[in-house]
Amino acid sequence: MADESGRCGLPCWSAMAQQATAGRRCLRAFVSGFFVAVPVTVTFLDRFAYVARVEGSSMQPFLNPEGGSKCDVVLLNRWSVRNYQVQRGDIVSVVSPRNPKQKIIKRVIGLEGDFIRTLAYKNRYVRVPDGHFWIEGDHHGHSLDSNSFGPVSVGLLHGRASHIIWPPNRWQRITASLPANRGPLDTDEEED
């Protein structure tokens, strides 16, 4: 049906073609942006840092002090451990020696060469071998740690917890500190 000017009431084909071209340009821009953003994000998470939810009671009272369903979320710094450099008192994420599909968060108690007085390991005293460290949860008896599986290879190190970022009332930087009576033995104690 034509109107008084003799034109049809249907949209103009050239306008529809322009809209389709604009739609294709938007889709192309989205796809190309997506293919740039995904590798950049993956590289960032693989090399620099990512967030992790801390579940369970093994690190209480420092992490998850309220227990229950409230979990702390920490920033795990991967860049700071790229050369496997950690210090006593650091809270680290490692691939579990018992279950390689699981990551666990524990505190570094001893480094290679240190003598450790264990809490429940098969030997009362252990010298941490080269290329290993000794990790423990802060809540002894509720933690699957080096007292269960022994010294941990530094090759299993995944990241160092640098900040608590959730919940907001617990925002803080995490500094290395050892619990009382934990850490390597002094050389004087070894000789006794």
Image (spheres, rainbow, N blue to C red):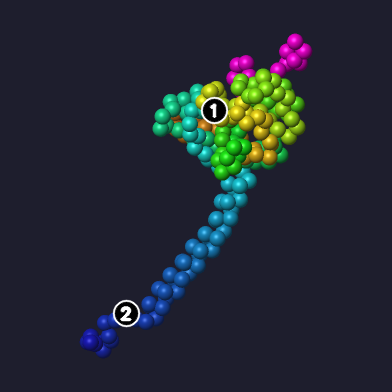
* Magenta-highlighted residues: 177-192
Q: Are marks 1 and 2 in contact (CB under 8 Å)?
A: no
Q: Quadrant of the N terminus?
A: bottom left
Q: Residue 29 location in percent, x, y?
A: 50, 65
Q: Amino acid at mark 2?
A: Pro
Q: Residue 58 location in percent, x, y?
A: 52, 28
Question: Image check: 52 left or right of 109?
Answer: left
Q: Residue at x 47, y 67 (%)?
A: 27
Q: Is residue 83 above or below residue 25?
A: above
Residue 36 showing in the rendered view? yes
Q: Residue at x 42, y 32 (%)?
A: 70
Q: Quadrant of residue 147?
A: top right
- Would you name the residue on which mark 2 appears? 11
Question: Image check: 7 left or right of 54?
Answer: left
Depth-wise, is mark 1 or mark 2 nearer the camera?
1
Q: Residue at x 41, y 29 (%)?
A: 68
Q: Say whether residue 187 is magenta.
A: yes
Q: Earlier in the sequence, mark 1 or mark 2?
A: 2
- Would you name the residue on which mark 1 appears? 143
Q: Residue 97 location in percent, x, y?
A: 62, 37
User: In the current view of this chain or complex, which residue is farthest to the top?
Assistant: 192
Q: Residue 15 location in percent, x, y?
A: 38, 78
Q: Nearer the viewer, residue 8 or 136?
A: 136
Residue 62 showing in the rendered view? no
